[in-house]
Amino acid sequence: MNVNFMENFEILTFNTSELGNTLVNKAIQSQGGVPSSVPTAVPTSVLSNIPASATSAIPAALASEIAGQNEAQIAEQIAQDLNIHDFYKIHMLDYCEGFYEPGPIVNSSNPNPSENVTYCSPATAFTFFNATQVLQQELKPGITLNQIQWPSQIQDAIDTMQVVQKVMFVLYCVGCGFAGLAVLEAIIAFLMDGRLSAVCNAVLDVFAFIALAIASGCSTGFMYVVSNAVNQYGSQVNVQAYRGNNFLIITWIATALPLIGAIGWCIDCCVGPDRRRKDRW
């Protein structure tokens, strides 16, 4: 699939660029050993690049692997060690992944990181982004999500909204179908110039509006429920979710157009062909 085709119209974006950094921060802040909240099974690679000033917080067995680095370097190194992408974008038919350039850390030298999309999954109906499965598949062998304390509540929220996502897809298809029929009927109406064709157009536009309105409402609810769950429970592992504002705008504009069309055809039906002919002359 072309990674540039409507890539900026995602439903949600998962920012995983700093996944695992919380464990490092806890280790840095701890004095005299790794705090109990950090599991003893944390992979060596996750803790391999900590500032030298924090060496006392790391087990002696890892001391030889510690090298002093700044925050941006630590984030980049952890991302490389975990082998995951910086972000994942959920679309209606697929998901895309990529990296922030020149890096994920926002600072004076990097105020607005750009997105470099490297892969998009094949477009399929009823697509489902299984965050836990995708991330686990990308992690290096020997590292698990449990080791970096991945919250199960995130996947629970996505699983809960899976049915909603399927309903969204069906309703978008139904709405687009009625909208397409309304366009064809509009061409016939201009040629026939009668009240019956105007009524048919109004009915088709109303059906299209209802289907798209419910679909847009479901997509809006999906965004808020999942993003709130990710931001609430994902803070412990530095995972954030952003709602797709571009998608929200385009879906509600698409919902409003059939309503405007239905109102226009109702007015046309009330005016009637005889009145329109008089106005022309």
Image (cartoon, helix red, strand yellow):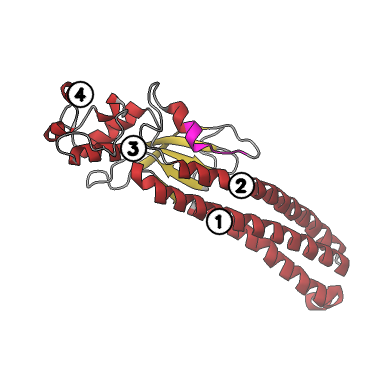
Please determine whether, in this image, residue 51 is positioned above or below residue 65: below
| 197 lies above or below 70 | below
What secondary structure is found at the residue carrying circle 2?
Answer: helix
Residue in the image at 20% along x and 32% along y: 50
Measured in 3D between alpha carbons, the distance from the residue under mark 2 to the one under mark 3, in whole angstroms, is 31 Å
Q: Earlier in the sequence, mark 2 or mark 3?
A: 3
Evaluate if marks 2 and 3 touch, with contact meaning CB atoms under 8 Å apart: no
Residue 29 lies within the magenta run = no
Q: Which amino acid does label 1 sit on?
A: Gly
First in sequence: mark 1 vs mark 3: 3
Q: Mark 3 points at which residue?
A: 101
Judged by depth in the image, the label closer to the viewer, 4 or 1, is 4
> Which range is magenta?
127-134
Residue at mark 2: 165
Label 2 vs label 3, nearer the camera: 2
Which residue sits at x=33%, y=37%?
A: 101
Callout 3: SS:
strand
Residues under labels 1 and 2: Cα distance? Answer: 10 Å
Residues at discs 1 and 2 in contact (Cβ within 8 Å):
no
Viewer-closest of 154 and 219: 154
Where residue 6 sits: x, y (%)? Answer: 54, 43
- Give amino acid for label 2: Gln
- In which quarter of the view is residue 45 placed? top left
Q: In this view, does 276 lie to the left or right of 75?
A: right
Residue 65 visible, this orientation: no
Residue 227, percent from left and from top: 46, 51
Q: Residue at x 19, y 27 (%)?
A: 59
Alpha carbon separation for disc pair 4 and 1? 46 Å
Residue labelled with disc 4: 62
Query: Residue lying farthest left?
Result: 53
Amino acid at the residue labelled 3: Glu
